[in-house]
Image (tube, rainbow, N blue to C red):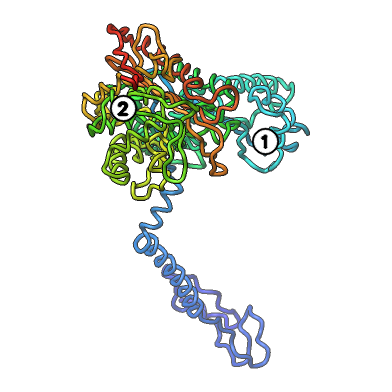
Amino acid sequence: MTAPRDPRRLPGPARPRGDGRPRQGAARPAPRRPGTARPGRPARPGNAAPLRLGSPRPRLRLISLGLTLVMLAFVVRLLQVQAVDANAYAAKANVNRYIPVTLPAERGSITDRHGVDLATTVDAYDITAAPDLLTPETAKIDDAPRQAAALLAPILGKDQADLERKLTANPKSKYVVLARQQTPQVWNQIKDLKNALNGSAAKGKGVNVLAGVNREAHSKRVYPNGDLAAGVLGFVDAEGHGAAGVERELNKRLAGKDGKRVYAQSGGRQVPTGDVKEQPAVPGSDVELTIDRDIQWAAQSAISEQVRKSRADRGYVIVQDTRTGEILALANAPGFDPNDISDANADALGNAALSDAYEPGSVSKLMSMAAVLEEGAATWNTHVVVPNRLPRADRAFADDIDHPTWYLTLNGVLAKSSNIGTILATEQLGKNQRQADRVLYSYLRKFGIGRYTGLGFPGETRGILAKPEDWSASQQYTIPFGQGLSLNAVQAASVYSTIANGGERVEPSLVRGSRDSSGGFTAAKAPKRTRVVSEKTAKTLAAMLESVVDNQQGTGTKAKIPGYRVAGKTGTSNRVDPKTGRYHGYTASFAGFAPADQPRVTVYCAVQNPTKGSYFGGQVCGPVFKRVMEFSLKTLKVAPSGKRPARLPVSYDPSR
């Protein structure tokens, strides 16, 4: 039997079952009365409603919307960069990432006919500095610019104060050019000095004030013979482009074609493993001139000496191969040194032998005589009575000296350079003066007067030759003896080369050809040839020109050369002052060729406005002609003449 429960004993808590529910028969908590507090929790005051948390969904929606807009902006930008503006951004990236560098082409050399350098290119450096590295804050000393200038001045050959001024003008600058076109030897001196200062600084002895000095590699145009043929060669400007002479005329051929190198960079430095694209530069071609350096030297020395001796404004000498038209020398005085044109006279920087237009005077009589002989109006032995004065148009014409009536052959008219005799001879070219003018004009044009020489040289003049219908009353009579028309020195030389070449004019040439970087030689275009007078007329004129030099009555006896027959003509003309446009002073000249029996070389000399000593062409230019011609014949190894001259008579006896 079970014992009865004690009604006072409270049932204990039921042992929990394995599933967490109270065992059957376990005591349950008594039901809570309304208004009473749950055991273990404080009672709510009064009858307040229970506290509930807000819903998180609105905030989540707002955050989601914000994130969506941000992501949408990224997507739109991504589409713009990768699709819409992809090419533009790629190009900008390449600009910043890839650096293009120009690879300058080496300028071709200019040589004489034997390959001797007249103009060439060598390595050179621009010396630069970074002024910001010389400030007291950076260099740690107060006078770093002054010390740097003192060290560099003797090496660069610059003024110390100027260098210091450049180093202090803009202290924040990272770049300033101290000197241009310096030789490698100069840079080596600076580099050695920098290394020495750097070693001392590493030992705590002083500061390397040249730390910011550097160099930029360039090329430098060098003319190894100084002022020799400067008027022909010209010079280059600061950018290395031809600015005058052959340098300018053939600039494209000499300059070549620059190359290009593109490399990847980062932070201003080349990426070692980055892409590199390179288009090599094409070197310029070497140009070979017709000039002979030795003959050029002889011509330039002779004319320079005569210009100084005569105290003249300027002078020129042309030496031409009569057979080929090639110019062996083209000398001007005064000249200039193309290595340094800073101190050169501006009037001397061109080529006056081609740019000066002047009245030729009596050397022009050769063309008048050529027309008379070729037209059959007279022969070399035609008798010409030459009075002391010849009234024509509005004046009375005279010769250079007063004389009694001369009884001359046509040969004597040329030998004694008679203006009156030349007028009388050319009047026979037509039935009237106007017709005679037209005939003479046609021959002047065939000789190249009033036309460009064909050299294509910068600044060349073609001279002045008016049409015959425009000749004034006086020009009809002055043009036959060389006044009233103008030409340049090369044109004058070409006239005599035409007669020396048997009456065929060969267009003058100055360039033989060019040689490319592979060594291939391309010859210049063959010069144009024009028949001016017959070979018979040319031979007669050559014999007449010998009388000018060989006959004691001739005006060119100072041009005689022992062992060689010389044909030549003097010229003395009134000179038009380029500043006033009026006649002032004289032009003295001499033109001729040798050997007269087998012509090889033509030499022409002209001196403008000689003011000391004689002003006659035979006296001023005859000796220059002789000196240059002798040297040229020996240099070219031309054999002496084997025959005696014909010695045509100059005058005749009117009583016979």
**Residue occupying the point 35% across, 64% down:** 84
Percent position of residue 529, x then y: 23, 31
For the residue pair 113 and 502, the one nearer the viewer reads as: 502
Q: Classify 260 as above or below 559.
A: below
Rendered image: mark on residue 576: none
Residue 133 tag number:
1
Question: Does the CB distance between marks 1 and 2 fall below 8 Å?
Answer: no
| Above or below, comparing residue 411 to residue 2 in the picture | above
Give the residue at x 37% y 11%: 635
**Mark 2, other Cα within 10 Å: few <14 / some 14–19 / many ≥20:** many
Q: Tell me which amino acid carries mark 2.
A: Ser
Q: Is residue 519 visible?
A: no
Asked whether 588 or 377 is in front, the reply is 377
Q: Secondary structure at mark 2?
A: strand
Q: Which residue is mark 2?
A: 514
SS of the residue at dot 1?
A: helix
Residue 426 lies left or right of residue 576; in this view the side is left
Q: Is residue 138 left or right of residue 273?
A: right
| Spot occupied by residue 67 in the image (x, y as percentages of width and height) | 46, 70
